[in-house]
Structure formats: structure tokens, C-alpha cells
């Protein structure tokens, strides 16, 4: 039996999203049906709406979600009806060449639901990041459900994408250590999570860079020791000034912009690491950097897919740190909205008014 539920759909490139009735099948083998309780609005949803990620319209948006499993298909043993879960977009396969080489964080063949969710007229939907959780119910691969301690779903759900990507960009991809200096460029949900991750890892200097003073003020709350408004200040010089003239050990680009990547590249100490967690659009090119600077500065330039996380290892741990008061995840929730509020939330995001608007279902 298919379930009729309300959902947020992007029907065509750059058009406002709409609320549609969709049909969600009962779970088949290896699948789980989830009652979504909360789902955050991520910049990646806006990239989908604007055609920056692909042309497979209509997209069923939403992918930073927590909820409760309501049914599972044959052969599912990892989760059961009633479990409180955060949805993830890295259900590792265990068999691809990355998994076999012991690097499941790069899994090239992650699992999603096999059956399709459709519009009332039968049009097949493309769920954002294989999740599609701006919907009362969604269908995922059972491995996309990660059990965590019971907590506020609006908070836990954010770990499903942007907040995990940011924390992981600093702690896992950037491998920030006790006493390191870190600079984070772009302090939205992802960048501020990188700041929180840098603090958790013991960084002693954390420089936040953004064009918006409101974001810089928030960055202080997550652990930034210095803030730089790159519209008014030379960001590279300011990061150097905060790090005894040397530059930061780890620079995190959390915007998705070649100009910002260039700043991050030059704001780094010798042998430092640049982490690219912001997602570029297809027309962007790598900044023109003299090759001698690439060689001469050494270190590493590392893209970070989903913060190199392993959901089943990292989500429960981060929820527990939150419950112990050691990670202020609730500070990312700027407002709680209804499904109807998603388009408006995109505008608020573009105007820089929120870290995360979270849809409560
Ligand atoms: N790699 C991943 O796995 C992953 C996961 C989730 C999101 N993302 C990406 O991370 C990026 C950030 O997402 P978000 O949700 O935090 O977005 P956001 O819109 O909330 O934040 C972006 C921030 O960048 C700032 N900014 C914009 N242009 C800037 C510039 N030129 N210099 C300095 N700061 C600038 C904005 O003021 C804003 O604070 C997006 O590209 C998103 O798609 C990546
Ligand atoms: Zn794999
Ligand atoms: Zn996201």
C-alpha cells in the first residue's frame, strides 16, 4: 500500500517550490519507512531547486532529518519500528573499491531505497541526496537510518547533513589537533559547525571569516576566538595577524566559491591543510593559483564529502556530546517552521538571517 503524504517539491529549475501530495510505498526488502519529525533547510536544497546539482526534476527536497521508523521491509535487522533515527546519505555498501580498501567514508555505491516515491499522477520524484524528508513520511534504505539517543528531533536531524559536514570538515578531513590554529571561511550552518568541531578538537586559535557581521557574532558563540569581516578587511592578512604572522594550520572553505578558496589557500601556514566543504556550482573553475605557490606551500588541499563521516559511528557520539552539554547543537536551530515555510526559509537563508530553519512535522 502506498501512503499519501504532503511534501515539498521543486518542479522546475529556479521556480518556487510547492506543496504536493506524494505517494510513498511500503518498505520492500532492505528498506525503511520513516515518520519524519523534523527536517532542516540546507543550502544544498536551494542548489537542487536552482538546478545546481542536476536536472532530474521534480526533486523531493529535504535531507537533514530525524524521525521514527514506522515500518521495515524483509531482511532488515539494524532498525525496528519505533526507533528514533537520524537519516543519513552515506549508507555504506561494504563492497565497492573504497569500502574494500578500508575507506568506507568514500563509499562509491551508497544505498538508497530501491522503490520510487511519486507524485499523484505517477511522475517519479528524485529525493534530495536520496532522502527527500520535507515530507510527512519518506522511504529510505534501512542503512540510511542511524539510531541515536532520544532527543529533540529538530536538533538531532541537523547532524544528517550540514552540521555533520562542518564538524567533520574540521575534525575528520582537516584532522584538527589540540593546539592547532583554524580559519573558517563562511559561517553559515556548515561553517559554524566547523568552528564547533575545531573547538571540540582543541584548536586554540579559531578565526571566523564572513561578509555578514550577524554570522560572525554567532561564530563567537560556537568558539571563534577572532572574527574577520572580509568585506571590510583583508582576510588573509587578518588570519596571519591572528596566528603570529604565519597563517592557520587548517583553513576550511564553507561557501563554495573560487574567490573564497583562494583566500583559504593563501591564509594557510606552510604545510597546512585547506578543506573544501562548500559545494561549487558547475560553472565555477578552480582559482588561478601560480603552481609554484601550490608546490612551495606544501600541505594538502582536501575536498570534504559529508565531513568524511561514518554516520553509525559519528551521529550517536555527537548526540551524546550534545546531551552532555559539550556541543551546542541547539544553537543551530534559528527557527521552527511548517512545510509551507520552506520557500520563505530559502529567502531568509539568502538574506543571511538564519543558520537553520527547521521544518517540524
Ligand atoms: N560537502 C558537503 O558534504 C556539504 C554538506 C552540506 C552543505 N554543503 C555546502 O556548504 C555550503 C554552506 O552551506 P550552509 O548551509 O552553511 O550555507 P549558508 O548559506 O547558511 O552559509 C553560507 C555563509 O557563507 C557566507 N558567505 C557567502 N559569500 C561569502 C564570501 N564571499 N566570503 C565569505 N563568506 C561568504 C554567507 O554570509 C553565509 O554566512 C553550501 O555550498 C552547501 O551546499 C556541503
Ligand atoms: Zn562502498
Ligand atoms: Zn545538506
Image (spheres, rainbow, N blue to C red):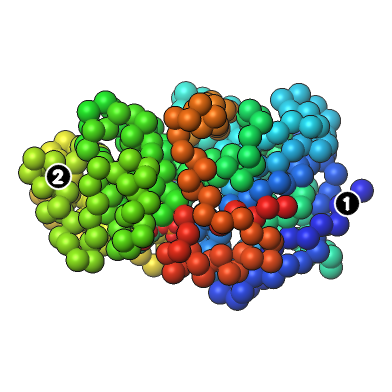
Q: Which mark is residue 242?
A: 2
What residue lies at 52% left-to-right and 54% top-to-bottom? 334
Closer to the camera in the image, 256 or 85: 85
* Mark 2 neighbour class, 10 Å CA radius: few under 14, some 14 to 19, many 20 or more: some
Q: Provide residue 38's location: percent of width, then percent of height.
A: 66, 48
Q: Provide residue 322's location: percent of width, then percent of height.
A: 51, 32
Q: Provide residue 237's location: percent of width, then percent of height.
A: 12, 54
Q: Viewed as shown, does residue 140 lie left or right of 294?
A: right
What residue lies at 59% left-to-right and 39% top-to-bottom? 156
Q: Badge 1 is on which residue?
A: 2
Q: CA distance from mark 2 to mark 1?
A: 57 Å
Q: Within the image, what quadrant is residue 120 found in?
A: bottom right
Q: Earlier in the sequence, mark 2 or mark 1?
A: 1
What residue lies at 63% left-to-right and 34% top-to-bottom? 151
**Position above or below: 343 against 154:** below
Closer to the camera in the image, 335 or 45: 335
Q: Residue at the right extreme?
A: 1
Closer to the camera in the image, 112 or 249: 249
Amino acid at each position: 500500500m502506498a501512503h499519501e503524504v504532503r511534501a515539498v517539491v521543486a518542479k522546475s529549475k529556479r521556480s518556487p517550490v510547492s506543496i504536493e501530495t506524494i505517494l510513498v510505498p511500503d518498505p520492500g526488502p532492505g528498506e525503511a519507512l520513516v515518520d519524519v519529525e523534523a527536517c532542516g533547510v540546507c543550502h544544498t536544497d536551494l542548489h537542487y531547486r536552482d538546478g545546481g546539482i542536476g536536472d532530474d526534476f521534480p526533486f523531493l527536497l529535504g535531507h537533514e532529518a530525524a524521525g521514527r521508523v514506522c515500518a521495515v521491509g524483509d531482511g532488515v535487522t539494524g532498525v525496528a519500528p519505533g526507533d528514533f533515527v537520524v537519516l543519513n546519505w552515506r549508507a555504506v555498501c561494504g563492497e565497492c573499491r573504497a569500502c574494500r580498501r578500508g575507506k568506507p567514508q568514500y563509499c562509491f555505491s551508497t544505498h538508497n531505497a530501491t522503490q520510487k516515491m511519486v507524485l499523484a499522477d505517477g511522475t517519479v520524484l528524485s529525493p534530495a541526496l536520496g532522502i527527500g524528508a520535507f515530507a510527512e513520511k519518506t522511504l529510505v534504505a534501512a542503512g540510511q537510518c542511524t539510531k541515536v539517543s532520544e532527543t529533540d528531533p529538530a536538533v538531532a536531524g541537523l547532524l544528517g547533513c550540514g552540521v555533520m559536514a562542518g564538524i567533520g570538515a574540521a575534525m575528520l578531513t582537516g584532522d584538527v589537533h589540540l593546539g592547532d590554529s583554524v580559519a573558517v571561511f563562511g559561517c553559515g550552518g556548515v561553517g559554524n559547525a566547523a568552528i564547533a568541531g575545531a573547538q571540540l578538537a582543541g584548536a586554540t586559535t579559531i578565526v571566523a571569516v564572513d561578509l555578514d557581521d550577524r554570522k560572525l557574532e554567532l561564530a563567537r558563540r560556537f568558539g571563534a576566538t577572532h572574527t574577520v569581516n572580509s568585506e571590510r578587511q583583508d582576510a588573509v592578512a587578518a588570519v596571519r595577524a591572528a596566528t603570529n604572522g604565519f597563517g592557520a594550520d587548517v583553513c576550511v572553505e564553507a561557501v563554495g566559491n573560487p574567490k573564497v578558496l583562494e583566500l583559504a589557500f593563501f591564509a594557510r601556514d606552510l604545510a597546512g591543510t585547506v578543506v573544501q566543504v562548500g559545494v561549487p556550482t558547475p560553472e565555477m573553475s578552480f582559482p588561478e593559483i601560480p603552481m609554484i605557490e601550490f608546490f612551495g606551500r606544501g600541505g594538502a588541499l582536501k575536498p570534504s564529502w559529508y565531513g568524511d563521516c561514518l554516520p553509525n559511528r559519528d551521529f550517536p557520539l555527537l548526540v551524546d556530546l550534545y546531551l552532555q552539554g559539550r556541543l551546542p547543537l541547539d544553537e543551530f536551530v534559528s527557527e521552527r517552521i511548517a512545510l509551507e515555510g520552506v520557500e520563505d526559509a530559502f529567502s531568509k537563508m539568502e538574506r543571511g538571517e538564519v543558520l537553520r530553519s527547521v521544518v517540524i512535522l
